Amino acid sequence: MNNIVEVISINKESLLTEMEVSDGITSKEIAIVTFSDSSERTYYVIKNVEIYNALHMKKEIYLKNCYIEEFSLALYRKKFGYSDKARLLFNSIAFNDCLFNGNNKELNMSNIEINGSLLSFINSIFYKVNSKNFSNSKFNQTTLLFNDTKLQNGNISLSFSEFNNVTLNFSKCVITSGNIYFNNLTCKNRCQFIFTKYEHFSGNVEYRESNLENTHIVYKDSLLPNGEISFKGTLHKKGRLYFNNCDLFCETFNMTTYRALVLERVSFNKSRFKSCCDILFELTTFLKTDVDFNETEFANSKITFDRFSIKFGNINFYLAKEIKNILFDRCKLDCEKICFESIIMNEGSIRFEDNDFFDSSLSFNNADLINSKLRISKCTIKNIFDLRMKCCDSLEIRKVTNYSIIDIRPIKKRLRLINLHDIRNEGRIDIDWIYSNLKHVIFNQSDISYSEIASQFLMLKQNYNKLGYYEYEDEAYFMYKKCKRLAEKQSKKRMLDNKKRNISLENKWYKSIGCRISCWLLSIYYGVINFVKLIIFEWNGGYATKPKSIFINMLIAQVTFALLYSVNFFALEYDRMPECKFEFLKYFQANYYFSIITFFTIGYGDIKPKATPAVFLSGIEGFVGVFLMSYFTVAFARKILR
């Protein structure tokens, strides 16, 4: 980057002989200028009146190495009687290697027209010039050159001008502070704005409400200022908009209501945002135009796509780094691909909410979202969503209708939190139950109800059934039933709490006591029902998903009843006894034999209950046996037949 060199002093000396520096323009003095780097340079001093006379005579002006004080066409208009609104027609004007001393006044070149010629300020220095005004001008097949120009402080304005086949070159130009305005421009027939190695340290850059047709705006290897860069309300039809390999210190990059129609690309390729910037694409329209943030560094900037519309283009954030937030809200994304592959984000978030994706695909393949969140909600998915991220802290896919494939298979590190609530899944979701640890990742969500958690497991159960992953389907179904039980328990508790809260509103004491008793009884009843569901359905066989568990419980039940029959209170009558050296084992074998034939409702009759308690106990065992056998049959058939 160029160093800023300031003017320290200006000393004038008379020439021995008059020097002609251009056609009809002479100099009688020289100005010796000392700069802040201790260098000195000699310029020919030119009187403004000589330039005005040459302009009035329609001469082409080519000045080089000249010193010009307080130059302004406002004085020219006054001298020759032109009104402020009159457009002045000139031929080529070149002020190359010149120094303009404005003495804190404006350099006014507004309302001019140059056709097929040149307006050049190559390698010139603007010293104490408050503003450079070229507004309301018309340039036809003209080249405007500000190459290597030191514009120093003050604003530059080309607003309300008309460009027709114009090349505007600010390469290696340096602006210390001040704004540059291209507002309300009209450009057509292939205009080029070139800003290679351009340096603008402080101020704003504005292209507001302009009409840019077939216009290329290229910033390359440049430094942009710490204020606002704005294309608000601009229509850009054909051409390109590049900010490639630039350092952007701006606080706001405003593309609100910007319309890009058939542009080659809007590119920020390999650029670096050096401060936390708000990048706004609100109510922006892109048609047949790509948006490219390839390898861009964002310095924790926030990017907002609000009511953004793109058709027949791509959005690319490949290898982008240091993003804080990216928001896509109420957008119409009718493009081939939205790419976030290999991006790096730390403690940030990406949100897609209430968007229409049409047939767009979305890819986060190999994305590294460290301690970051990805949320997709209120969307319809019709193409592949590749969410195979290297790392992501939290993934939320809510209120989504899926007609395609959502691939959620983490590459390196498991997701800490996954929320898949209210998904209508007409396609498929590829996610590994075991590797993603879905059982705990979904169940341990703290900010939603058990009912919402249950709906997620039900969706996964249906998804795994569709894919033929029946082991995962059973796991998801078990968690669905478990969460449903907990949701019912939670609902009943909430109802009882509300009832207890209303007790204090009762004026009569007997009504209050009645309400308390009814709450107590209901609490016991609901507790018993929940406990029965927990023991019989959940722990016993995992809601008919675990036949092995049911079989083990059948064996445990048989042994338990055999031990109970060994108690005198439940004694049995034996027609025959098995042979055994140990007395206890002999009776246990007989009791276990009776337990088995009772459990399976065989009943040979060689051993029978001795007293009424044993009769009732054997009846209970028969019921338990029938229930567990039926339960086992359902669970086993469910496993095998699939």
Image (cartoon, helix red, strand yellow):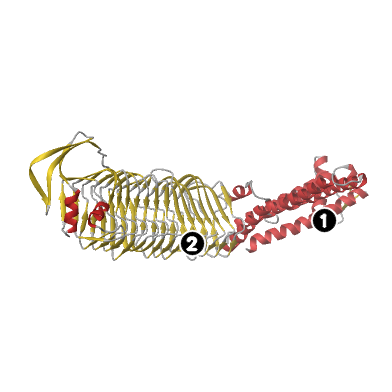
Q: Nearer the viewer, residue 222 or 121?
A: 121
Q: Can residue 365 be seen here?
A: no
Q: Position of residue 470 (x, y in %)?
A: 60, 59
Which comes before the other along the chain, label 1 or label 2?
A: 2
Question: Disc 1 residue type?
Answer: Phe
Q: Residues within 10 Å of mark 1 (few under 14, many from 20)?
A: some
Instruction: Work out which residue is located at the far top of the displayed protein and give it.
Output: 38
81 left or right of 433? Answer: left
Q: Say which quadrant the C terminus sits in.
A: bottom right
Q: Can residue 491 be seen here?
A: yes
Which label was assigned to residue 623?
Answer: 1
437 left or right of 606? Answer: left
Q: Nearer the viewer, mark 1 or mark 2?
A: 2
463 left or right of 108? Answer: right
Q: Residues within 10 Å of mark 2 (few under 14, many from 20)?
A: many
Question: Disc 2 residue type?
Answer: Ile
Q: Position of residue 570 (x, y in %)?
A: 88, 46
Which label was assigned to residue 466?
Answer: none
| Total count of labels | 2
Q: Nearer the viewer, residue 182 or 49?
A: 49
SS at mark 2? loop
Q: Position of residue 306 (x, y in %)?
A: 49, 57
What residue lies at 29% left-to-right and 66% top-to-bottom? 189
**Label 2 near label 1: C-beta < 8 Å?**
no
Q: Nearer the viewer, residue 140 or 466?
A: 140
Residue ID for mark 2: 384
528 left or right of 164? Answer: right
SS at mark 1? helix
Real-space Cα separation, disc 1 to disc 2, in angstroms:
52 Å
Q: Position of residue 592 (x, y in %)?
A: 80, 48
